[in-house]
Amino acid sequence: MKSRLIVNPNLCTGCRTCELACSFTHSVAGKPGLSRIYPLDGGFKDLFVPVVCLQCEDPACARSCLVDAITRNPETGAMELDEEKCVRCMACVSACPFGCSLFDRVNNLVVKCDLCGGDPACAHFCPTKALEYKPIVPKALKSAG
Amino acid sequence: MVNITINGKLVQAYEGEMLLTAIRRENIDIPALCHHEAVEPYGACRLCMVEITKDEWDGWKNHVTSCLYPVEEGLIVNTHTPTVMELRKTILDLFLAGSPHSTVIRKLAAEYGVTKTSYEEVPDGTDCILCGLCTRVCDKMGFSAISAINRGHGKEIAPPLNEPPPDCVGCLSCAYICPTNYIKFTDDGKTRKIWGRKFKLLHCKKTGQPTITEEFAQYLIKNRQIPEDYFKVNDLSHRMELALKMGEITQWGREE
């Protein structure tokens, strides 16, 4: 079974280590890139929600991309953006209903979470395990043994 | 996989891909102005010229544009031989005569030792090198708002009849892709102007930040089946909404 990036807002302290890990992992020519993950205020006391690309089944970003730069990686299941193909039309940035296609103004790049090619750095660095990268085992299967 | 030799190094390339892609994957820097991964190769600028040969060619060599030459088994490629450098130098010399004021061309030509053209400069030479990247990307995206008009010396890129193009949506892809930054546009956060046409920008309902043009959003809604609601707010507000929704769901779990 494919692994998923599992977000558990109950454990998130809003320390933003994931942002740092993401920025440095996706650095461009020595400059830190724009983070693809944001722990945002969840609207309740002491609740932070790490907002990251949900890797939708029928993603609006890929549908809106007119040059087919966003494709699914069959190994990780992540929607990956080909920077070489991207023409910066901002269609995906506006079309994503979760706002997880971002424009990096510093490096002039459109970026989105690619699950680091199957080994997400944010999950590695999360001190409270609010972010985990593991296969989801449905409850029914778990109880069956 | 296909085995080829690039500058004496044996490398593997995917079947059907062009030589330029294989060369660039090896981090060998060869110039190309008319190439972009989003569109089909075109071979307009001729700068990606390389020398190719094969063992069975008995010492015969050929010079080809690598962006248009598919990889072949046993191909021996040399990217920086004296002849290739001389070819590129001549091409840049000609470019410099046609676009004497282009900073991109001047910089590239200086790298190859050409600081002044040996030909006669075109008196009203523009920065446009007629590589066709803008028209190709416009075609690929499905708008076809601009095209090359006239022939010979009078050839230029323009919208139909030199009037504001009705099919343009103001996505600015042509301006981004232009290798010499010839395509000009203005964007003041409220309206965007390109090819002589004005576009109204959509604004986020919450933050007031500009997003894309109304025409582009309408095109995506109609042709790519994106729901209209998605364009009401910008990416930051979308993230905030998602965080609040997920926060709400998490709160249900806490109460239980």
Image (tube, coloured by chain):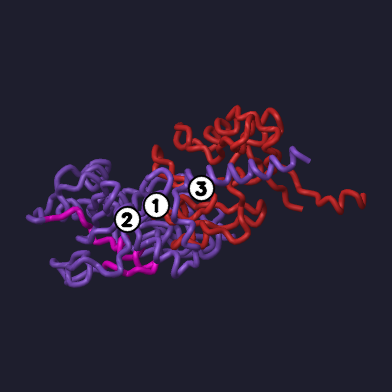
Chain colours: A red, B purple
Left/right of residue B11 with respect to residue B211 in the rendered view: right
Amino acid, disc 3: His
Q: Residues within 10 Å of mark 3 (few under 14, many from 20)?
A: many
Residue A74's place in the image compared with A4, above or below, is: below
**Place of residue A33 in the rendered image (x, y in percent of width and height, measured from the top left):** 48, 36
Asked whether the residues under the numbered discs 3 and 2 touch, taking CB atoms below 8 Å apart as contact, a structural biologist would say no
Amino acid, disc 2: Leu
Asked if marks 2 and 1 fall on the same chain, the answer is: no
Q: Residues within 10 Å of mark 1 (few under 14, many from 20)?
A: many
Q: Identify residue for label 3.
A: B238
Q: Identify residue for label 2.
A: B172
- Name the residue located 65 percent from the left edge and 54 percent from the top edge: A77
- The residues colored magenta run B125-146
Asked whether the residues under the numbered discs 2 and 1 touch, taking CB atoms below 8 Å apart as contact, a structural biologist would say yes
Left/right of residue B4 with respect to residue B132 in the rendered view: right
B130 and B208: which one is in front? B208
Dot 3 lies on which element?
helix
Q: Nearer the viewer, mark 3 or mark 2?
A: 3
Q: Is residue B132 magenta?
A: yes
A80 and B73: which one is in front? A80
- Name the residue located 44 percent from the left edge and 54 percent from the top edge: B232
Q: Which mark is residue A88?
A: 1
- Name the residue located 24 percent from the left edge and 59 percent from the top edge: B198
Amino acid, disc 1: Arg
C-alpha separation, residue under disc 1 versus residue under disc 3: 20 Å
Asked whether the residues under the numbered discs 1 and 3 touch, taking CB atoms below 8 Å apart as contact, a structural biologist would say no
Image mark 3: chain: B
